[in-house]
Image (tube, rainbow, N blue to C red):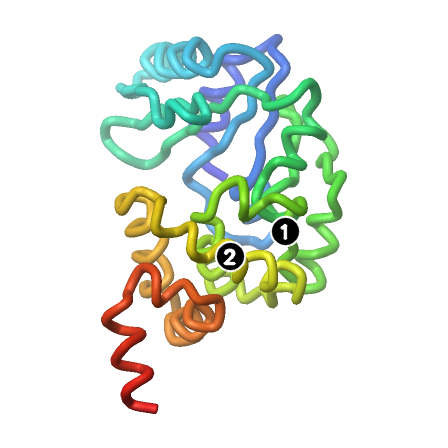
């Protein structure tokens, strides 16, 4: 985990209720490199992001902060010379457990107090990591955000996880909703899928889920003709 980024965010948010969540917590436990941090803050994420940018400046690192998502109220802080970025979100619901239950997959619903301590894992994401399986965090995970259909593929191929049948079924049902997702968000997921060492498996899984015919209708048509 980026020691500099972690030190800066801890300094900026000292005394506030905040947690590291998602990919940073997951990847550290998998021994993968971590440069980007995701933070859930019990408070105003914009205020938190500005505090982080100011703390970076005090530490001698120029950083920019900006609103990342109006829908989710997320903000991003980026080191101007590269090296790290920190995304800050406000806590959804009235508790961290509710917030984690609204996330995409159990392996991304693991939190760690910002000041350090034992991980908070109400959905069993750590056990899923050990077992190599990919489960949806809740019954409405894909309905809440159809982009998660592609994210299931991306996480599966990047981390070599096997999606559970229930997750596949739920993703397949919501694949048509990808048509309503912004092209920019779709492109970012596709970019990582095709860059993966298991890109072929990713494309096969996209087809199995009915996602290819939505985002790449011409490619799906060619596949059908070849059969």
What residue would you read off at disc 2? Answer: 152
Q: Which of 170 and 36 is in front in this view?
A: 170
Q: Which residue is drawn at 38% across and 76% down?
A: 200
* 65 displayed left or right of 27: left
Return the x and y of residue 164 as percentages of the image width and height: 66, 64
* 46 displayed left or right of 31: left
Q: Residue at x 30, y 27 (%)?
A: 79
Label whose residue precedes the other's in the sequence (2 or 1):
1
Q: How crowded is mark 2: few (under 14 residues within 10 Å), some or many (20 or more)?
A: many
Q: Residue at x 36, y 34 (%)?
A: 84
Return the x and y of residue 44 as percentages of the image width and height: 49, 11
Instruction: Check the image and report above or below for 148 versus 75.
Output: below
Q: How crowded is mark 1: few (under 14 residues within 10 Å), some or many (20 or more)?
A: many
Question: Which circle marks residue 76 in the picture?
Answer: none
Q: Nearer the viewer, residue 28 or 185?
A: 185
Q: Nearer the viewer, residue 63 or 169?
A: 169
* 172 displayed left or right of 224: right
* 154 displayed left or right of 181: right
Mark 2 → mark 1, Cα distance in angstroms:
9 Å
Return the x and y of residue 18 as percentages of the image width and height: 60, 20
What secondary structure is found at the residue carrying circle 1? Answer: loop
Q: Give the image quarter of residue 86.
A: top left
What secondary structure is found at the residue carrying circle 2? Answer: helix
Q: Nearer the viewer, residue 118 or 21?
A: 21
The C terminus sits in image quarter? bottom left
Q: Residue at x 76, y 39 (%)?
A: 122
How many marks on residues? 2
Do tag 2 and tag 1 residues touch (Cβ < 8 Å)?
A: no
Return the x and y of residue 64 as percentages of the image width and height: 28, 20
Q: Give the image quarter of residue 168.
A: bottom right
What residue would you read off at disc 1? Answer: 136
């Amino acid at each position: 985990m980026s020691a500099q980024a972690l030190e800066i965010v801890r300094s900026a948010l000292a005394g506030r209720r905040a947690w590291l969540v998602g990919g940073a917590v997951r990847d550290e436990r998998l021994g993968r490199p971590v440069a980007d941090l995701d933070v859930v803050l019990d408070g105003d994420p914009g205020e938190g992001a500005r505090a982080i940018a100011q703390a970076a400046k005090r530490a001698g690192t120029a950083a920019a902060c900006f609103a990342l998502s109006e829908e989710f109220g997320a903000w991003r802080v980026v080191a101007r010379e590269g090296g790290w970025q920190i995304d800050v979100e406000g806590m959804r619901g009235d508790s961290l457990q509710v917030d984690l239950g609204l996330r995409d997959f159990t392996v991304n619903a693991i939190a760690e107090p910002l000041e350090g301590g034992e991980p908070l894992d109400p959905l069993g994401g750590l056990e899923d990591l050990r077992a190599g399986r990919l489960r949806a965090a809740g019954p409405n995970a894909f309905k809440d955000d159809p982009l998660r259909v592609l994210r299931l593929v991306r996480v599966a191929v990047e981390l070599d996880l096997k999606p559970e049948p229930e997750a596949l079924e739920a993703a397949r049902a919501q694949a048509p909703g990808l048509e309503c997702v912004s092209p920019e968000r779709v492109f970012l997921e596709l970019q990582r899928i095709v860059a993966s060492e298991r890109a072929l498996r990713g494309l096969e899984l996209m087809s199995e889920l009915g996602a290819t015919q939505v985002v790449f209708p011409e490619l799906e048509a060619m596949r059908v003709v070849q059969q």
